Image: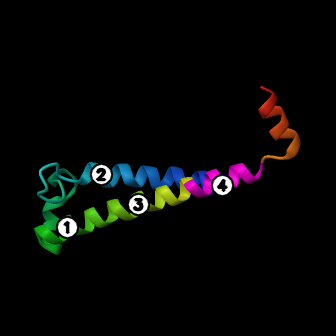
Amino acid sequence: MTLLTVLIALVSVLLMAVILIQNPKGGGVDSTFGGNQANQLFGAAGSTDIVERATWVLAGLLFILCIAATLLAGSNVTGAAAEQLLSQ
């Protein structure tokens, strides 16, 4: 469970970074984060596609990890713990 929590935190931080790198007007990687070099390397459309794909992949991974953590946490509840939760 600890490993899963660390993975969720890591993916969340990476997702925030990828979202902050994006240009809000759809122009590609922001120049503050080295966008000029990325645009020269991949082209303006190429860098946008890579950042957009990374956003979708990280969001999907975060979704899957959260569902897995929920299922794992639910399976760790024992009979005594479940009775205590229900009595509250």
Please tell me the numbered disc located at residue 58: 3
Q: Depth check: 65 or 29 in front?
A: 65
- Residue at screen point 17% across, 52% down: 23
| Disc 3 residue type (three-letter) | Leu
Mark-to-mark CA distance, 1 and 2: 13 Å
Mark-to-mark CA distance, 4 and 2: 28 Å
Element type at mark 3:
helix
Of the numbered discs 1 and 4, the one sitting upstream in the chain is 1
Q: Is residue 62 left or right of residue 79?
A: left
Query: Does 71 appear in magenta?
Result: yes
Of the numbered discs 1 and 2, the one sitting upstream in the chain is 2
Q: In which quarter of the image is the N terminus?
A: bottom right
Mark-to-mark CA distance, 4 and 3: 20 Å
Element type at mark 2:
helix
Q: In which quarter of the image is the C terminus?
A: top right
How would you classify the magenta stretch by its main secondary structure? helix
Mark-to-mark CA distance, 1 and 4: 36 Å
Please tell me the numbered disc located at residue 67: none
User: Which segment did they paint magenta?
Assistant: 67-76
Could you say which quadrant of the image residue 60 lies in?
bottom left
Pointer 2 residue: 19
CB contact under 8 Å: marks 1 and 2? no
Pointer 1 residue: 47
| Disc 1 residue type (three-letter) | Ser
| Disc 4 residue type (three-letter) | Leu
Please identify, in this view, whether the residue under mark 1 or under mark 4 is nearer the observer.
4
Element type at mark 1:
helix
Pointer 4 residue: 71
Mark 3 closeness class: few <14, some 14–19, many ≥20 residues within 10 Å: some
Mark 2 closeness class: few <14, some 14–19, many ≥20 residues within 10 Å: some
Q: Is residue 41 left or right of residue 72?
A: left
- Residue at screen point 13% across, 62% down: 36
